[in-house]
Every structure is written in C-alpha cells, then in structure tokens.
Image: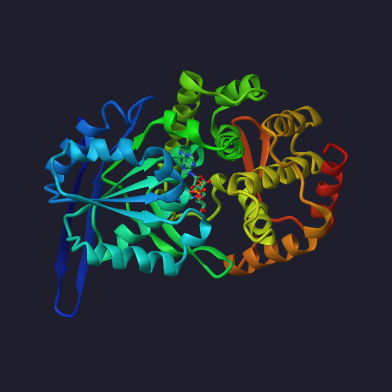
Amino acid sequence: MSASSSSSRLTVLADDDSFAVRAHRVDAYRIHLAEGLATSGLDAHLGSLTAQLEAPEIVIVIDTGAAEHHLRTVTVAVKHTGLPFSTVPVPAGESSKTPEGLTNLISALHQNAATRRTLLLGVGGGMVCDLVTAAAATYMRGVPYALVPTTVLAQVDAAIGGKGGVDYGTAKNLLGAFHHPAGVYVDPALTSTLPERHVRAGLAEVVKVALIANPVLFAALEKTAHTLPTGQELTAIVRDAIEAKLLLLAPDPFEQKDLRRLLNLGHCIGHPYEAATGYQILHGEAVAAGTAVAASHAYLSGKTSLEERDRILNVLAAYQLPITIPQDLRETVWEGVSTVRRIRNGPLHLVLPHHPGHCTITDDIDRPAFDKALSDLATRS
Ligand SMILES: NC(=O)c1ccc[n+]([C@@H]2O[C@H](COP(=O)([O-])OP(=O)(O)OC[C@H]3O[C@@H](n4cnc5c(N)ncnc54)[C@H](O)[C@@H]3O)[C@@H](O)[C@H]2O)c1
C-alpha cells in the first residue's frame, strides 16, 4: 500500500518586539521497487496514492524517448485510477532541462488547468525527474508529484532524494529546489529498452555509491561487470544502490549542514568534463572519468594502494566507461574546476576513494597533481 503524507505546522513565540517563528514540515512517502512493477502493481499504487492525496486528475509528463517504449504501459496504469488525465511530452535531451523547458512545462500545466491537488507523474530519465521535481516545487508554490524513472541512472540516483533543478547557461542545476515526491515507482525492467551506453552510464553512479558506502555491492559489480546485469541481478543492484544513497542522504537531506559531501565523488571533475564536451558525453560517463581521476590522485598521494586503485579502474573499464580525460579537453576541464572552486567560494572538497566502502575528502587538487593523475591514467587507458 502506498503511504504518502505531509504534515506541517508553525510554532510562534511572541514577545513585545519580535516573533520567533518555526516552520516544521515532514514529507513521508514510499519508494516501491519491483521488476515488472509498471505492468503489475503501478495501477494499484497510483489508485491508492491519488485517493490519499485527493487528486482530481493526473498529468503524465513523459520524455519522448521513454514515451516511444513505455507510454502505453503507464497510460494503462493511470487509466485504472478512473481519474481524468492528460499527457505532456517533453523532448528528450538535456536541452529540455532549462528555464525554457521549465516554462514550457508550466505553460502546459496551466493550459491543462492543473490545480494545487493535481498529481504530476514524471516518467523518464534524470532529465525528466529533475524537471518535474522543479516544476512541482514551483507551480502554484508546490504541487504533489510522483516519479516512474526509466533509466538506470534515474532509478539509482536522480529519482532518489527530492532534488529538482534546471541548468542555466552552462551552469548545471543552477535553478531548483528540494521537493520530495509523493511516491516513486522503480521498475528495472523498463530500462531494457535503453541503449547499452545509457545502461553503462547509469552503472557509473552505482559504482560511485558502492565505493562510498557498500563494499558488498562493489564486489557484486566486479563480478558482473563484463556482462551487463539484467533481470533479478539488475533489480538487486538497483535496490542496494537506492538504499546506499538514502543512507548517505539521511543526515542532511536538504544539504544544509555540510557542502563536503561524499556523494560528490567523481563530480568535482566530472561536471566540468561534461560541460567541456558541450554535454556530448553522458553524465554517468563524466562521473566515471572524474572517479578515475580521484582514484589515481588517491594512489599518487599515498591514500590508497595500487591494488585498490586498479580495482576501481578495472570495474569502470569493464563497464566500458571512460577512465581518463582526452588531452585536448584538459585545459577547459581545469578552467571548469577553477570555476567550481570560485562558486563554492573556497576549496574544491575533492572526494578520494581509498577502497570500497571508504572514501575521504581532501581540500583540493592543484594543477600539477591533476596533470600527474591524468598521466598516470594515460598509462592505463
Ligand atoms: N537529482 C539528482 O539527484 C540527480 C542525480 C544524478 C543525475 N541527475 C541528472 O540526471 C540527468 C541525466 O539523466 P539520464 O542519464 O537518465 O538522462 P536522460 O534523462 O536525458 O535520458 C537519457 C536518454 O534515454 C532516453 N530514455 C529514457 N528512458 C528510456 C527507456 N526506458 N528506453 C529508451 N530510452 C529511454 C531519453 O529519451 C534520453 O534520450 C542529468 O540532467 C543529471 O544532472 C540528477
């Protein structure tokens, strides 16, 4: 049974010349995971969720690439609720995750007369998850939404944690908000229609989270890396990755306490690399390269052994993920790293993997060390 509820209240302490105000809000929801969930179970989950939310209708917001394969299945489940619904297709690609893309979606919601209680149902990869979360946080100051992630990356990462956002110019996720969903429905079978390259890119985020928090998952990845996981094997991997991410988010779900986050493994260098290619490489591929640079730097700075560095590089390479940055992009990537440093108004907080289940954060990496790490990787790739 779906459980989703929000409770909120304000406490006010008044004295003569000030009011001490505390706003409390608790969002509670379930992430359901099962192979085949979209064809068997999603209908019932949506039925109980919409009843609980008293939603008068549903707007399906779906990535056009995902729609080609899965719109029918999702529509069957939505029809089962008996509620009126409409469908808003979002053109595939990162270029829809922009202020223009957000405005287009908000216009479509307005045209469809969506109300404060309308349930938005985001169906697609990380792009749609981020866009729908941002739209749900913004439209009418916040409406309920649920997600059916259809890429490996979205199932293990983007749909988990309630982070929404759109890019602004070359700055990734510059606009956005934290807004938790009312439900998330993960069916790994939906990813069987993904091009292999996207499956591999999604697995890069699994390698990341396993390196940070789950050595058993990392060992499982080492075993399966030469053949892409499918079926129950993939479902188990997705499950463990979701659990690891939730545990890592738990102490600071709104990222208020500490900007030094282990989940940034691979991202300090991965994001600038992704931007330097004009987003021609996939997010997960950039994270893989960023993780490889961090592993090499960890080895060269004496934080980890050659054997552990190789375990990390071997898994990434076995999934055919990039483990270096091309020579001609290094200067641009380094400029991007410097921009990240400027935006953070301080050091980079580079996450270094020591061995699966143990990473630490070092303040920064200087240019000679960055070049040395890339030369080290060049001997491997
Ligand atoms: N919010 C977060 O915590 C978080 C975490 C990681 C990444 N992200 C974001 O996620 C985005 C990347 O997500 P992504 O890699 O899923 O990319 P994506 O959403 O762009 O999807 C990749 C491609 O797969 C297609 N597609 C989607 N589902 C399909 C399916 N089942 N079958 C066939 N094709 C399908 C899409 O049309 C698209 O062409 C980035 O914008 C990144 O910033 C967000």
**What residue sits 79% from the left and 58% below the top?**
330
**What residue sits 45% from the left and 25% below the top?**
235
Residue 247 % position (x, y): 43, 36
Q: The C terminus lies in which quarter of the figure? A: top right
Question: Going by the image, does 184 lie left or right of 205?
Answer: left
- Is residue 38 depicted above or below 149 in this figure? above
179 or 247: which is nearer to us? 179
Residue 279 % position (x, y): 62, 57
- Is residue 243 depicted above or below 177 in this figure? above
**What residue sits 51% from the left and 61% below the top?**
95
Looking at the rendering, which quadrant does residue 342 occupy? bottom right
How is the model colour-coded? rainbow
- Is residue 114 depicted above or below 232 in this figure? below
Q: How many marks?
A: 0
Residue 40 % position (x, y): 28, 26
66 or 174: which is nearer to us? 66
Question: Going by the image, does 59 lie left or right of 202?
Answer: left
From where the camera sits, is residue 339 visible? yes
**What residue sits 61% from the left and 45% below the top?**
265
22 or 30: which is nearer to us? 30
Residue 198 % position (x, y): 57, 40
Q: The N terminus lies in which quarter of the figure? A: top left
Looking at the rendering, which quadrant does residue 218 occupy? top right
